[in-house]
Amino acid sequence: MIFPYALIALAASVAYAQGPTASGWDDTQILNYALNLTDLQNAFYSQSLSKFDTQSFNSSGYGPFVRTGFVQIGQNKASQAALLGSILGANATASCTYNFSQVSNTADFTEGSQIVENIGESN
């Protein structure tokens, strides 16, 4: 699983060294945008998964592997945020405070997961 992170680090460091882009955004702005999006996703998984144990997923008709998969996605988001933060160093924007308290059941969680992932894929 370390291989994807190495690719992200390599791509980010190459992009970071190149200066302004055709879009007019510089590399710091682009990487901070990615960091903010990843922070949002990380907060969603961290806050939401802390509410629902394996039994909550099982009771909702999901197999035990479903929560495990979501935990792995959440860990991936935390690692991505840490990597982007380390690349940006002092140039990293501060994380926002997110509140996902309205996610009250596993159906809300799985739907919310699809939404936050689609946000990441659409940009």
Image (spheres, helix red, strand yellow):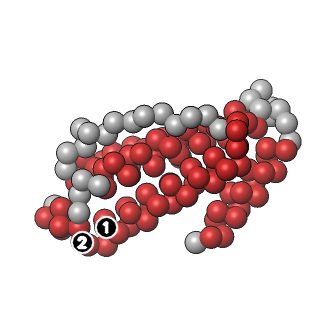
Measured as percent of width and height from the top left, residue 82 is found at 59, 52
From the viewer's perspective, tell me whether residue 68 is left or right of residue 85: left
From the viewer's perspective, tell me whether residue 81 is left or right of residue 62: right
From the viewer's perspective, tell me whether residue 110 is left or right of residue 23: left
Amino acid under disc 2:
Gly
Residue at image point 83% right, 32% down? 20
Give the SS element for disc 1.
Answer: helix
Give how far apart the Cα atoms at labels 1 and 2 are.
6 Å
> Dot 2, how many residues are within 10 Å of its Cα: few (below 14), some (14-19), or many (20+)?
few
From the viewer's perspective, tell me whether residue 66 is left or right of residue 86: left
Q: Toward the viewer: 33 or 91?
A: 91
Residue at image point 31% right, 65% down? 67
Amino acid under disc 1:
Val
Q: Are marks 1 and 2 in contact (CB under 8 Å)?
A: yes
- Total marks placed: 2
Give the SS element for disc 2.
Answer: loop
Which residue is disc 2 drawn over?
63
* Vertical comparison of 56 with 1: above or below: above
Q: Quadrant of the C terminus?
A: top right
Q: Quadrant of the N terminus?
A: bottom right
Measured as percent of width and height from the top left, residue 53 is found at 23, 63
Which residue is disc 1 drawn over?
66
Residue furthest out toward the right: 18
